[in-house]
Amino acid sequence: MPDARSGSLLAPFFAQQLYALRTSRIASDRQRWRSFTDVLSGFPTLSGATVSIEAGQPPELVLEYPGRVVLGLDELSSGEQEIAALTAAVLLAKSSIVAVEEPELGLDVRTQDLWRRVCDRQRDESLVHQFIFESHAPTFDGARVVRFSRDPDGWSRVEDVPTVVEEPLSREAREKGAEEVYVSKEGFTRLPEPMRAELGLGQQGTRLWFLRGAEAWEAWPEQQLATLLAEKGK
């Protein structure tokens, strides 16, 4: 959500902290600034940009594509602004527990995955001990997931459940070309990115036919996935 006073996705507090790191005479502070710029340049749409921050009230984050264009943060797409704001919030966090509400908004699946890795790295380095994601995207599922749903009678249901596919099985499935997506009990889901590209959905989407093959739909619950992979490996 944009800051109420500045209208920017990067809150003035974070902008001031970033400027302090960039201009600090302490080597560790400068390294934290470089970590921030390195993370941003790792996202595909920001690759090749030189990131700096200029003095002001509040300081302004600026991205320069050498020889082409210089853009302020507010001139970037909403997704790119969100990447910068989320990354700043995580890298500057001083709390051991960080909660993020709907981090997937404005980010495509690939960018969600890259940003999740940023969070995992912060946790692995013990800079943050725990992340709590309030999300509708399976990208942000952890070892334990709290799922919220609404029953037909209107009551909300809260379930503490394990992640659907354990890591070894998930890795084997991906190596053989499969991709996991979450499907709600009503049947709502997001098609895998390769499938969307092959279907040529474009910006407006399209109507599709789902055909049943001779044996079954090409969608498999976890209970049958291990057996299926074993048979295909023969």
Image: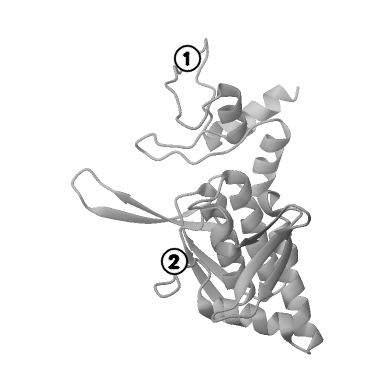
Residue 107: image tag: none
Tell me which numbered mark, 2 or 1, is placed earlier along the sequence: 2
The x, y position of residue 43, in whole percent, is 69, 53
Q: Amino acid at mark 1?
A: Arg
What is the number of callouts on the image? 2
Residue 124 seen in the current view: no
> At 60% from the left edge and 64% from the top edge, which residue is drawn?
72
Q: Is residue 225 depicted above or below 214 in this figure?
A: below
Say which element carries label 2. Answer: loop
Of residue 25 and residue 102, the one placed in the foreground of this image is 25
Q: Quadrant of residue 67?
A: bottom right
Q: Tell me the quadrant of the picture where the N terminus can be found.
A: bottom left
Give the Cα distance between marks 2 and 1. 46 Å
| Residue at position x 71%, y 31% in the image | 176
Q: Is 174 located above or below residue 98 in the figure?
A: above
Quarter holding the C terminus? Answer: top right
Circle 1 crowding by C-alpha within 10 Å: few under 14, some 14–19, many from 20: few
Secondary-structure class at tag 1: loop
Residue bearing mark 1: 212
Amino acid type at circle 2 is Pro
Nearer the camera: disc 2 or disc 1 = 2
* Disc 2: which residue: 2
Q: Nearer the viewer, residue 120 or 80?
A: 80
The x, y position of residue 187, in whole percent, is: 39, 34
